[in-house]
Amino acid sequence: MSAALLRDLRAALEEGGLRGSFLVRDLRSGAELGIEPDREYPIASLVKVPLAAATLDRIHRGELDAATPLEVEPGGVTTPGPTGLTRFRHPARIALGDLLYLSTSLSDGTAADVLFGLTPPPEITRRLGEWGLPGIAVRHVMRDLVETPAERFDAAEADLAQALAIGAATPGGHRLPQLDVTRANAASARALLGLLQALWTPSRIAPPVAAGVRELMANNVIRHRLTPDFASDAARWSSKTGTLLNMRHEMGVVEHADGGAFAVVALTESSVPAAIQPEAEVLMSRVARALRDELRGG
């Protein structure tokens, strides 16, 4: 049954102009089902999850204080997409702990960059290694993601930026550094699922740190992508999205009232040159849900 399902889901993705790396794992049994789960993708805002974990770990160790107020310069970004401080026009003074909420739950890139200033990418990579979580490359800060072709065209020409992102791919990488897995923050669905498992089950990550990240992901406000297929009165969906040009991602865990828990990672790229693609959101969610349903019913 799984082979036929995977064949049908691959066909549906191709027909919808999507390619992706999907993986769903039952956190109780370890059973998993995926599509190209080891294919690497630039992860965009998904990097804010390891950033949150590293920051909370430093708070747990006493290296940082969540109550420390920090001066934040306004992002001043006016193009569609960015949220929070990234769109602010005036300086702000915000506690470190609140910046964690803005960065993770609201996907605020400026808040994330303040946290990166305290815990740079190499330090986050080092901590991931200490936790036994290879395969997640943290190389740059978030402001690099607002320096793409999307910022060089006006809103009426958004399709041109998408077309450039699609057409600039090469067999060895990508001409845009933000979309090149050898230069960007990058990971596979399998590597990101390993991080989710470490946050939701006993691991080398300190329990208070893991609990803090889980809470931030449970309070995620960007819920238009996989949430409709995973959240219900009988299920809690905790997640983080990532979006950049033709890339649409989400990673999360669904916890059912019966005690079942499934980690889900969906990384996708579209070959359709359009900035707004609700059909792509629906399709990636349907594929992820079908994988979860197959595991849950098997």
Image (cartoon, helix red, strand yellow):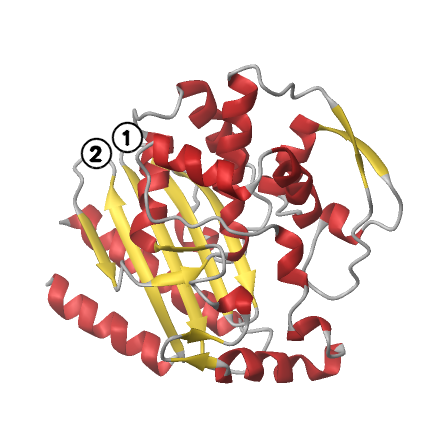
Indicate the amino acid at tag 2: Arg
Judged left or right of residue 101, residue 282 is left
Position in image of residue 182 (x %, y %):
43, 62
Please give the label number shown on residue 197.
none
Residue at 73% in and 21% down: 68
Mark 2–mark 1 CB contact (< 8 Å): yes
Please give the label number shown on residue 28.
2
Q: Earlier in the sequence, mark 2 or mark 1?
A: 2
Viewer-proximal residue, 197 or 281?
A: 197
Judged left or right of residue 225, residue 80 is right
**SS at badge 1:** loop
Number of disc labels: 2
Position in image of residue 137 (x %, y %):
42, 50
Residue at 62% in and 21% down: 64
Residue at 67% in and 55% down: 143
In the rendered view, would you say 115 is above or below 156? above
Residue at 33% in and 58% down: 288
Q: Which residue is mark 1?
A: 259
Viewer-proximal residue, 45 or 295?
A: 45
Say which of marks 2 and 1 sits in front. 2
In the rendered view, would you say 15 is above or below 189? below
Query: In the picture, which quadrant includes the N terminus?
Result: bottom left
Position in image of residue 264 (x %, y %):
34, 49
Neighbor class of circle 2 (other Cα within 10 Å; few <14, some 14-19, many 20+) is: few
**SS at badge 2:** loop
Position in image of residue 298 (x %, y %):
13, 49
Neighbor class of circle 1 (other Cα within 10 Å; few <14, some 14-19, many 20+) is: few
Viewer-proximal residue, 277 or 88?
A: 88
Indicate the amino acid at tag 1: Gly
In the rendered view, would you say 10 is above or below 193? below
Task: Tell me where residue 229 sits by quadrant.
Answer: bottom left
